[in-house]
Amino acid sequence: MIHFPTTITDNFFDDPWYVIEIANRCEYKSDPDGKWPGVRSQSLEEIDKEFFNYFIKRFYLQFYDHEYITSGFFGVKATTRFQKISGEEQGWIHSDYPHQSTIINYLTPSAAPETGTRIYTKRNEDVRDDLQTSKVEYYKGNVSKEVIDPILQQHNEQFIENTRVANVFNRCLSFDSHLWHGVGKFDSKEERLTMITFVDHVITKGTPLATSRSLPLVRENL
């Protein structure tokens, strides 16, 4: 069940340039296991715990009031990192399951709109998992782009695009992590800077969609 709606919030941070300053102070590393493209920072909680707590609170104030969030009955387990991707890439469609929610903050000024995020549905119930092995080897640098391109196309053809979100500076996108998604065509010398949050669990009295769906339609017969 999806607990939180897909949400787009423009002008999310009051001062996005301050957030970029934090990102520029970080050290970045690629994943030795090839789980994701580009490079990521250490967790934001390690870099600046006060700002991490502020970000989580600000995000969930879109769904709950301040009194409830600070009451002690609300809690969030999440990890936030900055990510940089450069060069020419085509997004590999994937899901972030078993995380509960994914939050992406776009932090590249004058970014190409098509380098945002696209959400997909499966054409068929089964998706070929064996193609993922090639993706991992490519991200680890063991497979060339010429080899990976037809495999990537074969993988992505298993999905149908249903939502396209442009890369707009200081935009925040959140969606349920089980949804299949990927970055659009990335062909730019400019780095794509994002802040990515994976939410594992939210301790709450009820989630927005669960609460809204609990209201039945009841009316008297005419």
Image: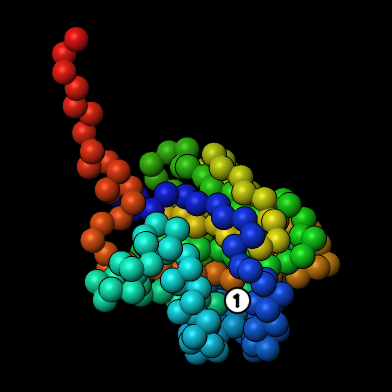
Coordinates of residue 12 in the picture (x, y in percent) = 59, 62
Q: How many marks?
A: 1
Drawn side of residue 206 relative to residue 220, left or right: right
What residue do we see at 38% from left, 41% from top?
125
**Is the residue 139 above or below the residue 209 in the image?**
below
- Determine which residue is flagged by label 1: 82
**Is the residue 211 above or below the residue 12 in the image?**
above
What residue do we see at 42% from left, 64% from top?
60
Give whichever of 20, 69 is nearer the camera. Answer: 69
What residue do we see at 27% from left, 41% from top?
213
**Is the residue 192 above or below the residue 41 in the image?**
above
Drawn side of residue 31 relative to residue 191, left or right: left
Helix, strand or loop status at disc 1: strand
Q: Residue furthest front?
A: 67
Coordinates of residue 209 in the picture (x, y in percent) = 33, 47
Is residue 23 in sight in this rendering? yes
